[in-house]
Image (cartoon, rainbow, N blue to C red):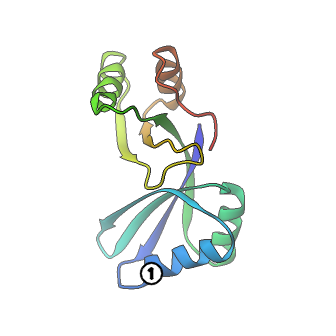
Amino acid sequence: MIKEISLFLPNYPGMLSQLVKLLRANDINLIAISVAQAKDYGLVMIIVDKPSECIDLLEENNYELSVKEVIAVKMSASAEIINDIAELMGTNNVNIEYMYSTLLKSRKNEAFIILHTDNNQKAFLLLKEKGLFPLESI
């Protein structure tokens, strides 16, 4: 499984740009990003190539953050992968809490679907058994 960093940003122009510039200035590359509005804040979930360094950097710069494990599944050329994942989790009583896809392709030119479930260990094993290629790390 991989680490996803979630943080709240004040919901006004330029805050996301500041975050991205900070990461870029410290040679930390975004692999995936999801941004959603949560009242007066933006909820930003990121996956980066250097999670430990990123966490330290964000904490040094007073960002409020949390870290959780998520699953990255290699996308196929077909949209059926989303159905395959949803069906596999549903038939095995695993709830998908959220899902998004990678913003950028990985160094091997592959894209991924990121998901978090109510039982990531079980979900990871189910995906692996089904041959859906969950990543151990990025």
Quadrant into which the N terminus falls: top right
What kind of element bears circle 1? helix
Q: In terms of image quadrants, where is residue 9?
A: bottom left
Q: Residue at x 35, y 30 (%)?
A: 95
Q: Residue furthest bottom?
A: 13
Position of residue 100 relative to residue 7, above or below, is: above
Residue occupying image coordinates x 37% and y 16%: 92
**59, above or below 116, in the image:** below
Please, what is the three-letter code of the amino acid marked with disc 1?
A: Met
Q: Quadrant of residue 8?
A: bottom left
Q: Tally the numbered discs.
A: 1
Location of residue 49 in the rendering, given as x and y in whole percent from the top left corner: 64, 54
Give the x, y percent position of residue 30.
54, 60
Q: Which residue is mark 1?
A: 15
Of residue 128 and residue 121, the one placed in the foreground of this image is: 128
Is residue 25 left or right of 33 when viewed as pictured? right
- In the picture, measured across the screen, residue 37 lies left or right of residue 2, that is left
Image coordinates of residue 43 in percent, x first then y, are: 40, 64
Task: Say few, some or many: other residues with alpha carbon within 10 Å of mark 1 (under 14 / 14 to 19 / 20 or more).
Answer: few
Residue depicted at x 69% and y 75%: 60
The location of residue 136, given as percent across then percent down, is 63, 34
Q: Is residue 120 above or below residue 6?
A: above
Quadrant where the C terminus is found in the figure = top right
